[in-house]
Amino acid sequence: MDSCFKRFIKMKPFLLETAEFLLERHKENLSQFTMVFPNRRAVLFFQKYLAQAANTAIWSPACTTINELMYKFSGLQQADDITLIFELYQVYKKEKKTEETFDEFYYWGEMLLNDFDDMDKYLVDAASLFRNLLAVKEIEKEFQYLLPEQIEAIQSFWSSFDPDKNSKFQQDFISVWSILYNVYRNFNEKLKENAIAYEGMIYRNVAESCISKTISLAESDKYIFIGFNALTKCETVLFEHLKKTKHAEFYWDYDDFYISNSYHQAGFFMRKNLVNFPSPAQNFNRNNLTNKKNIRIIAAPSGMGQAKLVGKLLQQIQNNSEEDRMKTAIVLSDETLLLPVLYSIPDTYSDVNITMGYPVKVTAAYSFIEHLLNLQRNSKKNKKEEIYFYHKDVLKILNHQYISGIKEAQNIIDAIVEKNKISLSRDDFKNNEFLFKLFNHFEDSTAMISWLLDVLQTVYIRRNKTGKEPSIEQELIYKVYSSVLRIKDVVISKQTVVGVKILIKLILQIVKNIRIPFEGEPLRGLQVMGILETRALDFDSVILLSLNEGILPKSSSSPSFIPYNLRKGFELPTVEHLDSIYAYYFYRLLQRVDTIDLLYSTNPDDDKSGEMSRFLLQLKFDANFKVNEDVVAHSVSMAHSKEIVIPKDAHVLNILNSYTDIESEKPRYFSASALNSYIECSLKFYFSYIAGLKEQESVSEDIDAALFGSLLHETAEHLYNKQKLISIKYLDEIRNNSVLIDQTILDAFQKYFFKTEKEITIDDIEGKSILTFEMLKKYIRQLLEKDKKYSPITIIGLEKKINTQFPVLCNGGKKNINLYGIIDRIDQIAEGLRIVDYKTSFPDAGFTNIEALFERNNPKRNKAAFQTFYYSLLYKLDTGNNKTIPALYFIRDLFNEDFDFHLHDKNNKTFVTDFTKYEDEFTTNLNVLFEEIYNKDISFSQTDDAASCTYCPYAEICHRG
């Protein structure tokens, strides 16, 4: 009966149990003790539980964290990372005698600082660690005080070095390794001179004062250490000293489930603690883990899927009172899910407390500063000292959420697309004071960082005024601002020479690694925290996310310059050390919980491996736990996209009839492109010419085939329109006039590429466009050269626009169809009147027969031949002259000695020299085509040739391409 009752008994939180015990043990003098905890959150919860247990007014004992206690004992002031790494850089540069810049050193500086921090916290002798022990036999003699397994690990590392056959990597390692002791020693001395320190240095200072018995400790000082697990050597030395001098008591949070099993990772450190620092609390309940719990493992399709699931799980938890909600925690193993999780929390949870570190690199604040610095990196001044910005950098900033809502910003975005503006001048932003401030260029690093701070401050103020910005976003902007300000204070003020480019790299490196420490009031509402913040805390309901192998536990430790075997040999933390720590966090969190949902992602790209954590596998296959499993999947139905069919209803027919009314205010015309589109896919024709769906416009930075064709057409037109009779002499004069050709091409660029009325020069053309410019010159010269063969040439028309009508018999009646086209060139040569069409596509002048030009689902259908015949028909309808020669000028073919403009009739094995011979057949097939278009019983439908959908702008609508 007792056993059954125990399975359902409400489990008491560890901190409450400890508070009750301490009140009983130290009734009269509890206020004389200082309570020490692993973190600040545990302090606040303990104070709450202490007040609850006392149930009356008492003098509360002082409460602190282990870090704060170490700072108090040492008297040293901890410096920020930027200051520390900069000071380390100065020492390293002097020892290495290198010209390495600060931004190049920063990554290594972070690594070295972490290594020095570990070395000090674990009391490693730096002189011994950084010795060059190539003579392996010396190791046993030098390290007799170490355990055999430690000596073996050190020997294992150095035995791989052969003095006579060292690789370049090994040589580089040894050259740096040999100076690291001096760097460490001199770095510490420099910090002491400035009365600052890093955390490990502070810890070592306290431990050494304990060893030398010089620590400042009054007889009345009493400490109670609560809720610790993995201790550094410095902490162990402090604990031992306080225990020996009877200044301390220790209270440990553990369960017999993993303590009694000597192989269980979760108890690795605790088993040592219980031996070294026994606790007076012997009657605490230590069998909580195996009590009845509702444990559920849930597989989600992605990290975002986990975040969305949190909202649904919270709705299932009965949290009717404020007290109940305080007993619910969302624990994030992957901090990047914080914002998605917050957005998924139901509105019924009005109070949400966040205590965790959040990486800036995944926030809008980081993307904004990254865009600003890229703007600086890519902006430039021209010869007139005018500032210009790259359009992609401009668009990223103007589309950013911090800028959205500014009317002038949207106007500039529209202008960039409409006018194809590759670059923008600073004057483009003068209509808005803030944008004019933002879009600036600096060549001085001090001015640049001052500008950056000014912009961030302005954004902070602007966003704050709206009242809409979440406080979390404000905190992010402020933290980024503070970090940039610190860079300015440390780097700019101390390093006399630092270029803008180096400063940009440095700012991005530093800001990317910032973590925002959210520390709210934890005694109200739903608790959201990282796994580290759960230490010593207990909850009735827990939702733990990202339980993927590689995330919990992490697959690797932080980057280190100290190789694994040396870390192991000198008892520095290794990945196994971290595994044991995270195993303890995981199982300790389960100890007193009633309900826990354990979520992981099945997406290998999203959460490292896509595999559940080993901790989940342990739970699944342990008979002591009853685990339920669930899978939440996206509703994936391999929906076969239905064929899209658009019937010709009254509305569609009305639009089609507008193509027959040439007298209307805005008549519509069928062009060769429209008809080619219909033949290729009638649905594509519908989307473009009936529904009016236009392709999304974007800035064309590279010159595609269509734009290249426009540039060539424009250039050719202006070179050929200067004289009606084109002689060989004239062609040679133009061909040899480089200035004229260059300017004509520039005019074409101005019109079609830059889309501006402002005159441009060759200096405005950059990058790949320069290659296009040179290519155009070669093609134009070759065009002039080839035309010498057909001169004299009489120009009849250039870029000739023709609007006409084509009579069609369809649906039992006659319709006059509006036709339209722009003929590149109409000229007269000795052979006859030519209808010339320039083509930049792959040369192909052949066709099987006229019917083949109208054939559906034929990837080899010659659209160029169709278009030239169409233009010949247009000319005949407009002038009555049908004795023309359809001519194709394939630009790529101009350098071919056998260049010929004639179409090739493959069926008759002859060249087309007279449109008259093909007119009847062409018009008959065109009539049939229009009969189909205007047949109300034939719907618009998708093509059967899926290959033609590859580059179709409407492929996504059809789920093709």
Image (spheres, helix red, strand yellow):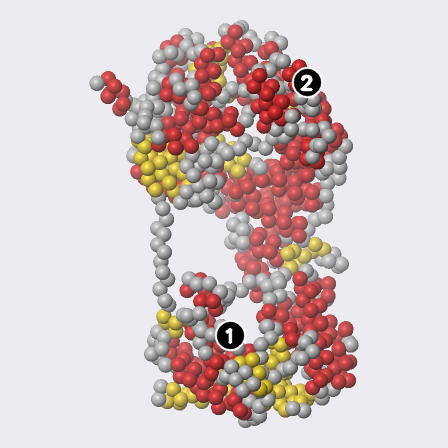
Locate residue 934, reporting x and y percent.
39, 81
Q: Give the mark nearer the N terminus: 1 vs 2.
A: 2
Locate residue 494 relative to residue 553 in the image: left or right. right
Q: Secondary structure at mark 1?
A: loop
- Which of these two is toward me, 487 or 100? 100
**Residue 118 % position (x, y):** 59, 24
Q: Choose top left, top right, bottom left or bottom right for residue 452.
A: top right
Seen at 71% across and 76% down, the residue is: 782
Query: Taking 271 as reference, is 569 left or right?
Result: right
- Looking at the picture, which amino acid does disc 1 mark? Lys
Residue at mark 2: 138
Please state which of the two labelled residues, at mark 1 or mark 2, is closer to the viewer: 2
Going by the image, does 412 lie left or right of 774?
left
Identify which residue is drawn at 57% across, 56% down: 395
| Residue 955 higher or lower than 564, as above or below | below
Local secondary structure at mark 2: helix
Q: Is residue 18 visible?
A: yes
Q: Which residue is mark 1?
A: 860
Q: Nearer the viewer, residue 748 or 303?
A: 303
User: Looking at the rendering, in which quadrant would you find the N terminus?
Assistant: top left
Rendered residue at 52%/41% (across/down): 474
